[in-house]
Amino acid sequence: MHREYHKWFSPNLNRDMELLILGHAGARVLVFPTRRGRFYEYETLGLVDALAEKIENGWLQLYCVDSIDRESVYNSEAHPYDRIRRHGQYEQYIINEVLPLSRLKNPQPFMISHGCSLGAYHALNIAFRHPQWFGKVVAFSGRYNLSEPVGEFRGLFDDYYDEEIYFHSPNHFLPNLDDSALLDSLRRLQIVMTIGAEDPFLASNVTLSSALQDKQIAHELYVWEGRAHQASDWQKMVQLYL
């Protein structure tokens, strides 16, 4: 399997960033790690092995990016105002640095945004905010509103809320979206979400699915048995949906 390691200084983040490219051809897949995960996590969780045939046959090429969650949404030492704006800088790093690299490496126009757990949030949020760059989003076990506590998971912005948080919360901005061009772009996306029947984020997925249906945006929501929020479940999911 073709494998490339890249590291460079990101002007959007003012720090070094690392990523892995796995595969030589096929649809480009932007892969976000789970909460506070690293760029090599997709391999360590066994998800690359689960996709080995598709990667080696040139059907998929993975771009596994690093996270900066410890500096942004999970940085409890920073004010929530700064957390969400650091997250916005991360989005600019993806859009203005990672995606151009992927197009330089691979002329295949089809781009998939993908992730598990918090990575699912990153994948879906960026695809919904910038659908012109993506053809598909595949989100496993995601949470699509980070500001409210869910079960044992706290809200990530304390009691603070502003416009920036709103526009990075798919469950908040989508129901009120009336931009016809953006809605048309979202309707061209292939959207696949999975969630466990016992996952505390089930309601978040159902809420998002309802909003998509109200906006006449086609999508698929698969509810798996149990919690289905671990690597062994995601290994099965990628074989079915990616």
Image (tube, rainbow, N blue to C red):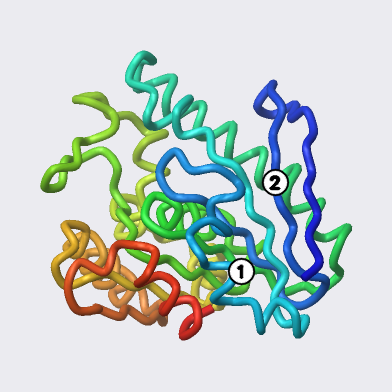
Residue at 80%, 33% (x, y): give it: 8
In the figure, 61 relative to 31: above or below?
below
From the top left corner, tell me how far across and down residue 149 is, in percent: 16, 40
Residue bearing mark 2: 19
Q: How many marks?
A: 2
Q: Can you tell which quarter of the image residue 227 is in? A: bottom left
From the top left corner, tell me how far across and down residue 46 is, in percent: 51, 65
User: For numbered disc 1, what is the local secondary structure?
Assistant: strand
Numbered disc in front, either 1 or 2: 2
User: For numbered disc 2, what is the local secondary structure?
Assistant: strand
From the top left corner, tell me how far across and down residue 146 is, in percent: 29, 42
Q: Point out the image quarter for the N terminus.
A: bottom right
In the figure, 53 relative to 40: above or below?
below
Judged left or right of residue 25, residue 206 is left
Front one among 180 and 192? 192
Please, what is the three-letter code of the amino acid marked with disc 2?
Leu
Residue bearing mark 1: 112
Mark number displayed over residue 68? none
Task: Kindly report the distance in space between the C-alpha atoms of the residues bearing marks 1 and 2.
Answer: 16 Å
Residue at 22%, 64% (x, y): give it: 207
Please, what is the three-letter code of the amino acid marked with disc 1?
Ile
Judged left or right of residue 104, residue 150 is left
